Amino acid sequence: MRTQVGIVGAGPAGLLLSHLLALHGIDSVVVDHRSREHIVARARAGVLEHGSARLLRAAGLGARMDREGIEHGGIYLQYDGVREHLDFRDLTGGRTVMVYAQTEVVKDLVEARQAAGARLEFEVADTRVDELDSRHPVLRYTAADGVRHEVVCDVIAGCDGFHGVCRPSIPDGVLRVFDRDYPYAWLGILAQVPPSTDELIYAYHPDGFALHSLRSPQVSRLYLQVDPDEQLSAWPDERIWEGLRRRFALDGWELADGLIFDRSITPMRSFVAEPMRYGRLFLAGDAAHIVPPTGAKGLNLAIADVTVLAEALVALLRDGRPELADAYSDECLRRVWRATHFSRWMTSMLHRAPGADAMREQLRLSQLRYTTASRAAATSLAENYVGYPPLRLD
Ligand code: DHB
């Protein structure tokens, strides 16, 4: 078998890359070891930056997002008994974010790719990527029906996430890796209850961080900080709601509760592997970098990576121009490091650190007060939150 771009991973990065390439007449094969049902059902983050939403629209993928997504012009920061609003429209010259779940983006992408007759293979096994430093890297996998395939490619895109096979296929000594764990995790729930807020609330409380997000007028998405080794079984529904009520408590405001129908615990880490390329293998999304979830940058970085990569691969494969492909890693890493810093900054400002002393607590509160009181500080948070640098769209 032959294709121009072999894509490992049918998450948002791999599917969107396949879609963007197809718009320019470049063909691809997408393989994933997971089932289609699993991929479209996983509850993940839900905030699209201004540029991500524009990109999806420009790529013809915005119809349902614009019908069902919820545009937000700001967030609330809560601490020390106050809840302050940051107005992104005002602070960033009119930019906003779109609350639309990653799950929905993936559903739209799978549907668009399948409707276009794309080669999309789920439940494959024993995926390998070989001959990466040759002009024709090879993607090998066993399809769901048990047949082994060998796809000769011009380029392979590793969009297979942090635990995927692509990054470890790069020879030792090529990548420089940066890695940090955090002493906390998020317990996330989806609940059948109208959101108790019009925009997201990021709350710092001495018990720990809490986030009130939403999915629709009927469904709320909530998170609370827990220890990284915490088990879901230790958190019956009433303990979750009680924890959330305490952390969001504010005079004159009440958190409505409802049926919890999805729950999970997410560990947190910062990870960057550079460069995001080896020979004719290009890494994109979580395969190359992970950010802690605070600020919702993970999906947006994946979208930004493949937007840059699609343009670079069109220039390389259609026009024979390698310059953009050669610049791919550096261009992406500038954004990746900005988001890595922002996510870490938001995380440390909003989470209770085990063993933090009184001095650290006072510094945290001072930072929160400054971020909400100073227009300069608020603008810095806002421009990072809506996406920095703004995604370049032609
Ligand atoms: C959501 C997740 C985030 O990490 C965040 O910062 C904001 C919202 C969410 O799932 O809705």
Image (cartoon, helix red, strand yellow):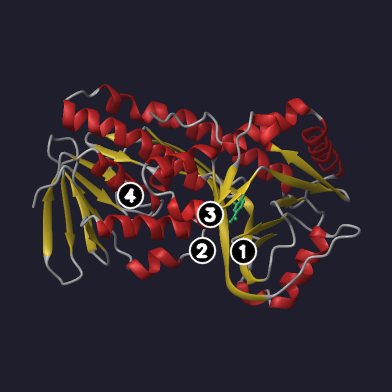
Instruction: Give residue 335's position: percent from left, percent from top.
Output: 49, 31
- Check residue 100 in the rendering and tell me which mark sits there, or answer none: 3
Hey, which quadrant is residue 33 in on the image?
bottom left
Name the kind of residue labelled 3 in the image.
Tyr
Label 3, residues with CA under 10 Å away: few <14, some 14-19, many ≥20: many
Say if mark 4 contacts mark 2, CB within 8 Å. Answer: no
Name the kind of residue labelled 1 in the image.
Gly
Q: Is residue 235 above or below residue 24?
A: below
Hey, which quadrant is residue 90 in on the image?
top right
What residue does disc 2 label? Answer: 43
What residue does disc 4 label? Answer: 14
Q: Secondary structure at mark 2?
A: loop
Residue 173 visible in the snapshot = no
Instruction: Give residue 138's position: percent from left, percent from top.
Output: 14, 47
In this image, 46 relative to 206: left or right?
left
Say if mark 4 contacts mark 3, CB within 8 Å. Answer: no
In this image, 328 relative to 320: left or right?
right
Give the Cα distance between marks 1 and 2.
Answer: 9 Å
Q: Nearer the viewer, mark 1 or mark 2?
A: 2
Of pointers 1 and 2, the one earlier in the residue sequence: 2
Name the kind of residue labelled 2 in the image.
Ala
Give the Cα distance between marks 4 and 1.
Answer: 25 Å
Q: Secondary structure at mark 3?
A: loop
What residue does disc 1 label? Answer: 188
Q: Is mark 1 within 8 Å of ligand 1?
A: yes
Hey, which quadrant is residue 21 in on the image?
top left
In this image, 298 relative to 230: left or right?
left
Of pointers 4 and 3, the one earlier in the residue sequence: 4
Q: Secondary structure at mark 4?
A: helix
